[in-house]
Each structure stands twice: as structure tokens, then as C-alpha cells.
Image: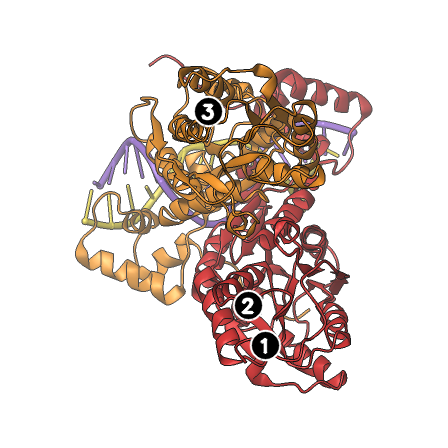
Chain colours: A red, B orange, C purple, D yellow
Amino acid sequence: MSTNSPRRVTIRDVAEAAGVGVATVSRVLSGTGSASPETRERVLAAVAALDYRPSALGRNLRRQRSGGIGLLVPDITDLFYARLADGVMAGAREAGEPVIIGVTGDDPEREADRIGALVEQSVERVIAVPAGDGESWAPAIRAGLTVVFAGRRGPDEPAVPAVLADDRTGMRTALEYLAGLGHRRIAFLARYGDRRRVRTFLDTLAALGVTADEDLVAYARASRDSAYAAAAGLFQHRPDLTALLAGGNLLGEAAVLAARELDLRIPRDVSLIMFDDVPWAELCSPPLTVIAEPARDMGYRAAELVLREGRRAREPRVVTLPTELIVRASCAPRRRTRPGG
Amino acid sequence: MSTNSPRRVTIRDVAEAAGVGVATVSRVLSGTGSASPETRERVLAAVAALDYRPSALGRNLRRQRSGGIGLLVPDITDLFYARLADGVMAGAREAGEPVIIGVTGDDPEREADRIGALVEQSVERVIAVPAGDGESWAPAIRAGLTVVFAGRRGPDEPAVPAVLADDRTGMRTALEYLAGLGHRRIAFLARYGDRRRVRTFLDTLAALGVTADEDLVAYARASRDSAYAAAAGLFQHRPDLTALLAGGNLLGEAAVLAARELDLRIPRDVSLIMFDDVPWAELCSPPLTVIAEPARDMGYRAAELVLREGRRAREPRVVTLPTELIVRASCAPRRRTRPGG
DNA sequence: CTGAAAGCGCTAACAC
DNA sequence: GTGTTAGCGCTTTCAG
């Protein structure tokens, strides 16, 4: 009944106050075109006096695009993606762009739904950790979306710019380490649909002269339950395995839990290496050896990329950031046999 | 050079295709006003045929508000806030509203900056974990923002609707438990600025007949370093403390790390209870006793609230969600003395 | 160097 | 029930 919020200050008000046309105000504020120093000053003064904040609404409608950056991650409560998101937000903030976030649950359908929502908002720059195989992006890209993949990429050649961790090298370093400790039955707990990494796993193993066994690869969906089931299944069906590589922090968590439940001691009975360094890896007992990935940097770089992509030629780019093996205490030399084996 | 993205389908195209006026299309789509079943059908058919997606840009400009929900959290890599954000996104998705996210680092200045960015986007519904004392919100609210606090509230009476955890009860339960184990020197590791909880801590202690000592309260800023320093300081300066309550999962993590560094065994030398149940609490050794807070629900409820608030009377509301003490293995009966004490 | 004017796509009066 | 129309605030030709 009382506080009738005063009408928003518009560019017109500024123009009037400064005694110039609205076009001039627009030019001065956007840095486009030219304006005499004197006019410039007057406009700026008026802006300050009225505390004018240009409305993104008007600008966006006029420009036919909403400026913001869309961000689609599988699960924001997974620290890896949270860090990625943090990096994206840092980059976006520097550019003064808002970030519209959505979660996909790693489900292509939900992903498609979220893409639709972004299109409806006329967001035309999107950073995404593509769900599943990342196949569903073609239409969106054809429709004019500028998209950058982060953390993973689509199935084929780099049709879409991407910021990735060098997990090929990370994997190799880890497997060499494990092989050096004498391990010959090394399992991989992978995210469902992560064909690329599985291939790398198998190839690298072969290159190291270790028998690569596809049955030593287990797949988990995005949930904790699924990860636990996959880990437990692996331990139970393959009593011969002596080392395990977990493809992410949720997977590693599941592996630790499953191992405990089955009374397997780490690293006495199984050695464990996990992709993605997280604080609890150090708190865990034993502290986990990990392959650290620069998630935050990846997000930041992705933001840079998606922001730049707009104005530059569309030369598909792939940025690869280094990983690092951090040795703690979850790996030990292979022992002859495993208790239950 | 090739793919000239075809002009977007507008409401005009639909109207033309359906042989009606644009207003009719708008009415049918928004469910407002009336339309004959026949017309309705024709419009819907045209919409489907053209794959028309209304532009949020046009609508927003017309309506003078951007629809979306702003979300401001101190740190998205803190699982508590990530869960909260997840809940907000779930609620927003059901309502078909985009979420514009920003991080404040728990810094009122950054917070003010983010609020400004939201206002610039004409976002008028915001869910926030207010930074610091949450004092800086008055202007924004006066300006017409609908804001709902989550997880914390401002300094004064509920001028702003809020969704909170019942940490009063959580604290009481935890302190009773600790007191029952014989602890008399109980410390509190608090977030800087969290006067409310500190008061509750002191009051509850007093009510339990335990000497409440303000020097047994340490404050940490939002960073891991600050948390660690505060925890270590507490342990070093107060060798008489036998139990510690950590005000959040980052604080708890710091406490575990600091205790280890100082060779204090949990729970032999110090008992530890942490606010906020996180997966690693179980992985930790020993597994941590925690006061679980329904972070995700809090976010979801906050979304409901902020969405409803628009159309209802502005009767400030506070929703309080239950907490739960989950006893694991980080607390033990008090022993006579502490090694270094 | 500057101003007038034309919309961007949509909704909400207002006529019919 | 339905169509016409007037803008929302901004950028961007186009004249001057």
C-alpha cells in the first residue's frame, strides 16, 4: 500500500537529464561510436546522478540474444562439477555475463530439456559437460548455439570446442605406477558411456604389456547407488583383481565403501587410485592416491573459450589441461593372493 | 559461410499460419483469456508445425521482469551449498524458471556486486545465503526484489522470509550428548559472523549447566586456510578442551586435519561433532558424528517460497526444517587429561 | 559528432 | 471470442 517502487530509470531519463539524445547515451555507455569529451562527461554525470543501470532486457531483445552463459552439468553436488562451475562463474563474472545453470543428471533427455530452456531464454552460449555420449547436441548447434564442452567431449572428432583434462597421460602414469608395483589384474570403474576412457585404459594396459581384460571394466551410472553396485560387483566377481582405478570421486568413494563392506583392506588387498583429487581423499584412511584434474581451471578456460568463440572464426579448438598423479597411501605392491581369492 | 541460421519463428508466424491474430496465439499459449476450442486447436497445430518456442526476451521486456530466479551462495564447492543449489534448481525446473547463479565468497561486497548484476537482468526473485550479517539486503528489497534467505537469515526479526535448519535443536541435542559423555570444556568452531549460532551455543551450554566460555569459540572465514588456522589455534591455545563442535563441513574437515597435525586422536583426545552430514564423514577415520541438515530440501522449499511470494500477500514467513544427530564414532567419554595439557 | 526513428517479440488494453 | 495496436528499453541505421 505504501512503497510504490519508483519506475526504473531508463536511458531516456538519462538522455533528458544530460540534454542529449538516447542514441548518444547508448554510444557513450557502450563505448561504440564517438562522442565529444564534453558530451561524454555530461552523460556520465547524468548516469551517476540518476544511478542508471541499463536494462539487460531491452538490450537483449534488441540484440536478439540474452548475453548470459548457459552451464549444464550432470550433478552440482559432485565436487568435480562444482569446481568446474566455480571456474565458469569466475570467467563469466569477469566478462560481466550472468550464468544460467542447469543439471542434467547425465541423462540425455533431461539434457535436451535443459537445452530447450536455454534456447527459450535466447541464451546462445553454452558450456556443457555433455550427457551420455553427447550425441544430442547436433540440433542445438545447427540452430546457432555456441557450445563448448568441458570435462568430456562428444563421440566424434572435435566438431565442438572442448576443454579437457589430459586423462590419457594421467591414466598412463597411474597404470605405470600400478604395473610397477607388480599389479597385473587392474580393474577400471568407469562412468557409464565413457567409451573413450575405457579405450584408453585398455590400450594403455596393452602398451604396458599387461593383459587387458574387458571384464575388468565395470560401468556405473551417475548415482551413488549405481557406483556402489558396480564397485561391489567388481570385487565379488573378480577376486583376482589386485588394483582398481576409479574414474571419478564418486566412483572412488563407492570403491572405498564397497571394499570395506567386503572386508578388503586398502592397500593390502587391493590398491586404489582415483581420478579427481578431493579434500576427503586425504582424510580417508588410508589417504587415497589420486590423479588430480584441474576442474576449476577447466571451467575458467571453457568460459574464456565460449566468450571468445562468438567473435572469432569458428575454428574448433580443444584445450587440454595437465593432470597430476598424487601418491598417497592407497597403493601397495601386489601380494601373491587375495584373501577370498 | 554456409549455415545461415533461419530467422527465429515468432508469434507472428504462428498467428499467420493459424489464420488468427497474435493476441489469440498469446492467449492460447498462456492460458489467459478465452478462445474457442476450434481456434485453440488451430493455434496449437500451428505451434507444433512450426516448432514455435516463445521468446523469453520479448515476454520479459513486456512484463518488465525476467522471470528467472537468482541464486546467491557463498561457495558452490561447499557441498552444503551445492545441495542447497540442487534443491533450488529442482524447484525452479518444476516451475519452468531458469536459475541465475552467483557466488559471493561470503563477502558482502561481492554479494552486493552480484545483486547488482541480478537487478541489471531484471531478476526480481532471489534466493540467497546472505553473506556476513546479511545487512546489505535492505536496498535491494526496497527496490522491489522478492528475496528469500536460505540456511541463514539476516540479523533482525524476519523481515525476509527464510528457510532454515533447526540448528537450535540440533545444537542442543549435540551438546546434551557431549555433556552426557562427561565433557565440560566444549569448543565451537564457527563461521565468522555467525552470531546467532554462537549465542545459541553459549545459551544452550549454560542451560545444561556447563560453563560457557566465550574463549572456547573460534571464528573462521569462508576459506579452508582460515578454517584450519582457527581450528589449530583452538587446539593449541586451549589444551583443556575435550570436545569440539564444528559449524559446517569445511570447518569439520579443518578440525580433523588440525587434530591430526597436532597429534590429537579423535575421539580419544578430543571428541568431534560436525554440522552437516557429508559422504566423507563416513569415510573418515573415525567416522564422524554429525548433525545432519536437509540442505537440498531447504533449497527446494526456498524455491517454492520465492515463487509463491510473488502472488501472495507479503507475510514474512520462516520455514524451519528438522536436523538430526547421527552418532558415529568421533565422540567418546571424557578422559581425565589431554596429552599436552 | 549527434538526434530521430524504427523496430526486436511479446502481452495487455481496448475495440469490435 | 478475437483482432488491432501500443509500447516495454534498448541499439542501430540513417540523416543532418
Residue at 43% of width from left, 65% of height from top?
A109
Q: Where is residue B120 in the image (x, y as percent from the top left)?
A: 56, 32
Please, what is the three-letter code of the amino acid marked with disc 1?
Arg
Disc number lying in front (3 or 1): 1
Q: Which of marks 1 and 2 is nearer the N terminus?
A: 2
Res A155 seen here: no
Q: In which quarter of the image is the N terminus of chain B?
A: bottom right
> Mark 1, chain letter?
A
Q: Which mark is residue A10?
A: none
| Up/down of B49 relative to A11, above or below | below
Q: Residue B153 carries which label?
A: 3
> Mark 2, chain letter?
A
State the separation of the CA atoms marked 1 and 2.
Answer: 9 Å
For mark 1, give the secondary structure.
loop
Would you name the residue on which mark 1 appears?
A: A338
Disc number lying in front (3 or 2): 2
| Up/down of A322 relative to A204, above or below | above
Mark 2 Cα-neighbour bin, 10 Å: few <14, some 14–19, many ≥20: some
Would you name the residue on which mark 2 appears?
A: A264
